[in-house]
Image (cartoon, rainbow, N blue to C red):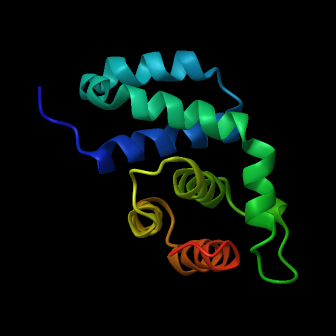
């Protein structure tokens, strides 16, 4: 079995957050499917599970963090599900996972966005505003 990088684990984590955001699917079921399709995720299962469940647990707080850093006129309801999941993942990592450098969380969110959406300036702007407001970096 090939070694799974943290970036690959983060991508799978993003997909799980996105699926729960979009379809309100059962997380344990989704994790089971992920492990069936990508057994290498077992290597980072602790990160994946703790991050997904952490994001679900802190959902309101993360939405508030995102809302506070939107340009005037923007509301969180207007953000695509992809962008919302990426922002929640990055802000969760920045706030709660000390061993991941903030710059890595931001860069990975921007790179994942390029794979799924092409909204990277928006992602970068919200995360930059969040870090500035909270004196991070």
Q: Position of residue 48 (x, y in %)?
A: 44, 33
In-image side of 10 versus 81 (left or right): left
Say which of 126 and 11 sits in front.
126
How many numbered circles are shown? 0
Q: Is residue 134 above or below residue 101?
A: below
In-image side of 57 versus 27 (left or right): right
| Residue displayed at 66% across by 72% down | 130
| Residue displayed at 50% across by 45% down | 14
Give residue 25's quadrant in the image: top right
Give residue 38's quadrant in the image: top left
| Residue displayed at 49% across by 28% down | 49
Give residue 124's quadrant in the image: bottom right
Q: Is residue 120 above or below residue 19?
A: below
Q: Position of residue 104 (x, y in %)?
A: 38, 64
| Residue displayed at 81% across by 58% down | 64
Say which of 117 and 127 sits in front.
127
Q: Position of residue 10 (x, y in %)?
A: 40, 46
Q: Quadrant of the N terminus?
A: top left
Q: Is residue 109 above or below residue 129?
A: above
In-image side of 126 versus 45 (left or right): right
Q: Position of residue 62 (x, y in %)?
A: 72, 52
């Amino acid at each position: 079995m090939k070694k799974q990088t943290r970036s690959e684990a983060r991508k799978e984590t993003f997909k799980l957050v996105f699926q729960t955001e979009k379809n309100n699917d059962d997380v344990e079921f989704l994790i089971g499917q992920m492990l069936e399709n990508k057994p290498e995720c077992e290597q980072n299962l602790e990160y994946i599970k703790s991050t997904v469940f952490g994001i679900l647990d802190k959902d309101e707080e993360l939405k508030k963090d995102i809302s506070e850093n939107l340009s005037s006129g923007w509301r969180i309801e207007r953000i695509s599900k992809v962008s919302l999941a990426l922002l929640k993942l990055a802000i969760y990592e920045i706030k709660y996972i000390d061993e991941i450098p903030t710059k890595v969380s931001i860069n990975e969110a921007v790179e994942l966005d390029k794979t799924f959406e092409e909204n990277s300036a928006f992602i970068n702007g919200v995360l930059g505003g969040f870090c500035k407001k909270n004196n991070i970096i």
